[in-house]
Image (tube, helix red, strand yellow):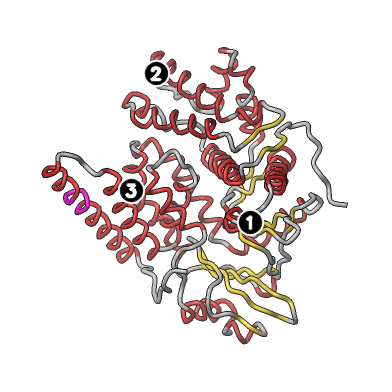
């Protein structure tokens, strides 16, 4: 794990200064690489991107909170950013630099008036893992192994200002205009404010786990309100192997398919039955036990799905709908893919661009069985995304659609990515009955 941090910039001035300094480093990288290109006659773009990604990530890691969370969000879509950025930013999911123990104790004293070792029979001073908003420590109470999540200082109070500070980086990396993503930034801000409220996460975690406990091969922690607060969340320790580590271990393809099927069924139940999504499907949020059951350990980011968006989204995901120009036109209006001021020409361009992308991304939903090891499927996603990003005309029209797309797309890209990592071949038939725990 990375070196521990003894302090985090909390004031707006110090956090802004950190990002300004990072911007200067990025500028220096451009000067350095373009100067080298003037001599050699060729720009090392890959090296430039790696240097910039490293400097930006290191800066966001020190800031923690929503600035680092934005990097995590961007890393989950492998097709928006160059690989250097997605690889580096993915570290924000579960291997960010942890907070030092004195700062952890300070948070406990603020919440409970006691040190961790006064509340628990034992408490590890070293974090088991550290992410963008908080880190987890292992503890024990009355013989029960516990996972204690501790929020970083200043996270909740800095969300709005952090997003404003980080916005220029996001715009530069995504190659879009500021006004085009304002509604999406607002959506992200609202979700981050929810994630920073551990009282809310406690309630959501208990309710969500209760709603899903009948599903076979899915496990959830037990939660302890008496050892939880607005900045600390205590739950039972789920033993097992982190999903990203499990994927790298030797296992049969049948086992990988079984786990992939469990993940798919878990998400389809959420979307179609609960109309609530666990909108943070990255490997750091899943633990695999000895029986290869799926343990789900973080419910800070849940997305409630409005009925009108759900109906329009899944109607549009049907290939027979995409073949009907009238239905496409109606649904593009409902889902705000068309904008009121679009010209007839722009609507034509948008229709072709989004229809092609949606048709491809929704292929699993239009199949009874889908093999996520299909490299051609993911290559095509990359080709379509690259085509949009590099074409000035298409790039100009790409930032559009309902704000609800932000976490819907995030969820599907995250789920697809995990299933690809598993090389899972699974049943994607919506009518397939879900396995229920006996």
Under circle 1, the secondary element is strand
Front tag of 1 and 2: 1
Q: Could you tell which of marks 1 and 3 lies nearer the N-terminus? A: 3
Q: Could you tell which of marks 2 and 3 lies nearer the N-terminus? A: 3
Under circle 3, the secondary element is helix
Residue at 42%, 39% in the rendered image:
80
The residue that mark 2 highlights is 346
Query: Relative to 30, is 324 above or below?
Result: above
Q: Residue 219: x and y, percent?
A: 74, 57
Q: CA distance from mark 1 to mark 3?
A: 29 Å
115 magenta-colored: no
Q: Which residues are magenta?
A: 28-32
The majority secondary structure of the magenta stretch comes to helix
Q: Could you tell which of marks 1 and 2 lies nearer the N-terminus? A: 1
Marks 1 and 2: CB-CB under 8 Å?
no
Check the image and name the residue furthest to the left.
39
Q: CA distance from mark 1 to mark 2?
A: 42 Å
Q: Residue 197: x and y, percent?
A: 57, 61
Q: Is 309 placed left or right of 208 in the picture?
A: left
The residue that mark 3 highlights is 169
The residue that mark 1 highlights is 286
Q: Is 226 placed left or right of 167 in the picture?
A: right
Check the image and name the residue furthest to the bottom.
118
Residue at 79%, 49% in the rendered image:
215
């Amino acid at each position: 794990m990375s070196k521990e941090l003894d302090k985090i910039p909390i004031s707006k001035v110090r956090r802004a200064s950190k990002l300004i300094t990072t911007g200067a480093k990025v500028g220096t990288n451009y000067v350095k690489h373009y100067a080298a290109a003037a001599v050699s006659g060729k720009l090392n773009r890959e090296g430039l991107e790696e240097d910039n990604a490293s400097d930006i990530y290191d800066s966001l890691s020190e800031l923690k909170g929503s600035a680092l969370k934005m990097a995590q969000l961007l890393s989950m879509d492998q097709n928006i950013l160059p690989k250097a950025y997605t690889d580096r930013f993915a570290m924000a999911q579960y291997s960010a630099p942890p907070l030092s123990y004195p700062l952890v104790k300070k948070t406990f004293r603020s919440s409970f008036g006691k040190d961790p070792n006064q509340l628990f029979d034992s408490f590890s001073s070293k974090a088991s893992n550290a992410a963008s908003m908080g880190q987890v420590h292992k503890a024990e109470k009355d013989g029960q192994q516990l996972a204690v999540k501790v929020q970083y200082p200043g996270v909740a109070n800095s969300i709005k200002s952090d997003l404003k500070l980080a916005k220029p980086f996001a715009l530069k990396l995504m190659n879009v205009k500021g006004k085009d993503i304002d509604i999406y930034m607002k959506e992200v801000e609202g979700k981050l404010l929810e994630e920073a409220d551990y009282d809310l996460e406690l309630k959501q975690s208990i309710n969500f786990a209760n709603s899903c406990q009948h599903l076979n091969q899915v496990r959830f922690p037990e939660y302890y309100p008496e050892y939880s607060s607005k900045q600390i969340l205590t739950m039972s320790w789920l033993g097992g192997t982190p999903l990203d580590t499990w994927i790298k271990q030797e296992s049969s393809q049948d086992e990988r398919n079984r786990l992939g099927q469990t993940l798919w069924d878990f998400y389809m139940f959420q979307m179609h039955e609960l109309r609530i999504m666990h909108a943070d499907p990255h490997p750091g949020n899943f633990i695999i036990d000895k029986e290869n059951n799926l343990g789900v350990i973080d419910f800070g980011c849940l997305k409630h799905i409005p009925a009108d968006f759900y109906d329009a989204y899944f109607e549009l995901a049907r290939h027979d709908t995409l073949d009907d120009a009238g239905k496409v036109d109606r649904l593009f209006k409902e889902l705000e893919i068309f904008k009121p001021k679009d010209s007839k020409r722009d609507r034509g361009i948008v229709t072709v661009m989004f229809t092609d992308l949606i048709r491809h991304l929704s292929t699993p939903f239009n199949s009874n069985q889908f093999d996520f090891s299909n490299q051609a499927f993911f290559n095509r996603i990359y080709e379509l995304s690259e085509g949009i990003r590099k074409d000035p005309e298409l790039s100009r029209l790409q930032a559009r659609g309902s704000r609800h797309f932000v976490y819907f797309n995030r969820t599907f890209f995250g789920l697809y990515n995990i299933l690809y990592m598993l090389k899972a071949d699974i049943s994607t038939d919506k009518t397939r009955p879900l396995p229920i725990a006996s």
